[in-house]
Image (tube, rainbow, N blue to C red):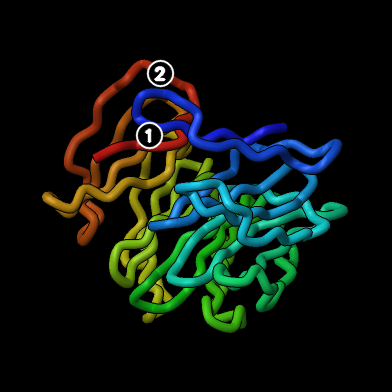
Amino acid sequence: NKLFAANHQGQTKWWFEAQPNDSYSGKIALSANSLFAATSKGHLYKFDKNNGHLDWLLETNKKILFSPLLYKNFVYLISAQDDQFFLSKVNGHDGQLQWIRKLLGFTAPSQATISEKNQLLLITDPNGSLLCLDLNNGNAYWQKKKLGEVSTPATVVGEVAYVGTSDAKLYAIHLKKKEDLWVYELTSGATSPITHIPGYNHVAVLTQSGYLHIVDATTGEGQWRYNTYTKAKVNTLFA
């Protein structure tokens, strides 16, 4: 139940011990000068990442599901309590809770992603939803439903969100127009987050059958696919 920071030579710079009967869950986020760490019992710590000084501790009383999401001076958390799910906004300077919103009808929410251009937080769920919330006040902007069993978080490029499903579909959704730009048929269900390839303006996704699909991000036309012969779920694709 200790958090360690090491230098480039592998020597310990500092360490900090969690509270009794608690442990760090590996959910960590870094900013320029700070480290945010979540624990198994729902505590969120902010440290000075250079010397380990504890700036503040927030007790959420909920299970924090993902690494903290940092945007400007704020921290966003997806958490769970008694089969209910929540999105919270915390002031990164002083650890004060700004607001909390219940994710109604959600069964297994994804990590939140940000549309900076639209100032939105996006969360997907296997119930077929893409929920878009105002990242400043947490109010609902739009919820797209009936997408099928969504299996990836949303990936945002400009004003477009890309989402994959277990029933072999890849969606491009225009957030301002609130409509589908295109839908692409995959060989099988999506098992990796959608990755944008900026130099070509393509998106990439891995499927259950092991195929890596490359699709034009603007038109939805398939460019090529490659059989990786792996059927493991992948957390990240690098471009």
Point 79% across, 46% down: residue: 41
Task: Give the number of the disc on residue 184.
Answer: none
Q: Is residue 62 above or below residue 73?
A: above
What residue would you read off at disc 2?
Answer: 230
Q: Residue furthest left?
A: 199
Comparing 222 with 121, the one in front is: 121
What residue would you read off at disc 1?
Answer: 206
Point 32% across, 20% down: residue: 228
- Spot occupied by residue 106 in the image (x, y as percentages of width and height): 71, 59
Question: Which quadrant of the rendered structure holds the N terminus?
Answer: top right
Residue 89 seen in this snapshot: no
- Spot occupied by residue 220 in the image (x, y as percentages of width and height): 25, 55
- Spot occupied by residue 53 in the image (x, y as percentages of width and height): 58, 52
Which callout, 2 or 1, points at the residue further toward the start of the chain?
1
Q: Is residue 202 above or below residue 116?
A: above
Q: Amino acid at mark 1?
A: Leu
Q: Are marks 2 and 1 in contact (CB under 8 Å)?
A: yes
Residue 67 seen in this snapshot: yes
Residue 205, image quadrant: top left
